[in-house]
Amino acid sequence: MAASQIVKDKVVLVTGAGRGIGRDIALMMAAEGAKVVVNDLGGAADGEGAGSATPAQEVVDEIKKAGGSAVANYDSVADPAGAEKMVKQAVETFGRIDCVVNNAGILRDRIFHRMSHMDWKAVIDVHLHGCFNTSRAAANYFKEQNGGSFVHFTSTSGLIGNFGQSNYAAAKLGIVGLSKSIALDMQRFNVRSNCISPFAWSRLIGTIPTETDAEKARVERIKQMTTAKIAPICVYLASDQAKDVTGQIFGVRKNEIFLFSQPRVLRSVHAGDEGWTPQSIAEVAMPAMQSSFYKLDRSGDIFTWDPI
């Protein structure tokens, strides 16, 4: 192996690694010297359908053909027992666990007044509960070995906003809170936790409407943002070179890397000893703060320039 491999001999679990972003992460992790557990349930983009072992095994075969080390796993991140099994498989196969990349996801987009409880629950279960399940399964190993890295996938759907994705947005913003709490709770054990918001063309966004010229142009721009562009920062965050990077939210769009802000107080107003009344809030407090209100922006309203 080349001495320059940044994650040489690290053991990494990548969820949802049979296709798209996860596949490219698994391949680059292996190319950079990591031993990889390639997890993929093999279901459809909406989480429906019988699982297939093919996607995960194909990635494992590709890694092994290139001289790397990998093993396939077909458990569901939404199942706590399944999450424990995939982490245990990493430890039993390769002797330890150094990084968990929480990439697995599904989409069930619906405008809010048409969203069913099942649409809500299915997305929350995979994204938010899934991140908790795999992270919790690895946490004690990280604590005992005094080190480890979590890389969670969030989205501008939650960070900024998008139509028809209340379930996905809630889960993805919840992941940000989860990541920050893990970073705070486990810092004493040299455990890091960060989020990545990816911009990439994959099957999860392949259903974007292309009826108007503007929509067609948008999709063509998105297609320039290949999934392989997301992998380098994941590999970096799994490495010892990222030992001082934790509790952050990064974005990757083609050749751009963003550091996202986190909620902080923008403005403050205070009343005298008498305190606020509903009427004085209406007359004084809201007008004083209104110039700092956020608009109902969507991701596309903020990222208005073409991918670089």
Image: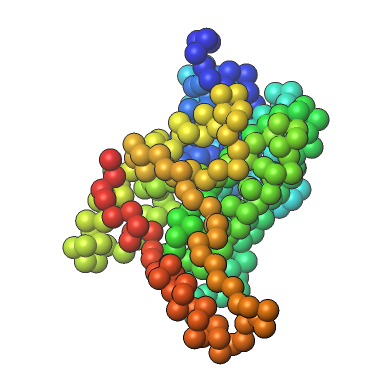
For residue 259, above or below residue 59: below
Of residues 172 and 223, the one drawn nearer to the viewer in this rendering: 172
Q: Say left or right for 296 vs 37.
A: left
- Residue 93 pos. (x, y %): 71, 26
Q: Quarter of the image containing the C terminus? A: top left
Q: How is the image coloured?
A: rainbow
For the point 60% across and 43% down, the residue is 247
Residue at 74% x, 44% y: name it. Answer: 185
The x, y position of residue 291, in whole percent, is: 40, 71
Number of residue marks: 0
- Expressed as whole percent of the image width and height from the top left, the position of residue 31 reads 49, 22
The answer to whether residue 47 is seen in the rendering is no
Location of residue 145 by image quarter: top right
Query: Which of the 4 image quadrants contains residue 148?
Result: top right
Tell me the quarter of the picture where residue 60 sits. top right
Depicted 2 relative to depicted 245: above or below: above
168 versus 253 height, above or below: below
Q: Is residue 196 left or right of residue 143?
A: left
User: Does residue 19 appear to the left or right of 34 in the view shown?
Assistant: left
Q: Residue furthest bottom?
A: 279
Residue shown at the point (71%, 31%) measured from the top left? 190
Q: Is residue 284 in sight in this rendering?
A: yes
- Please name whichever residue, 248 or 220, is drawn nearer the observer in this view of the structure: 248
Residue lying at 55% horizontally and 71% vertically, measured from the top left: 269
The residue positioned farthest toward the left in the image shown: 213
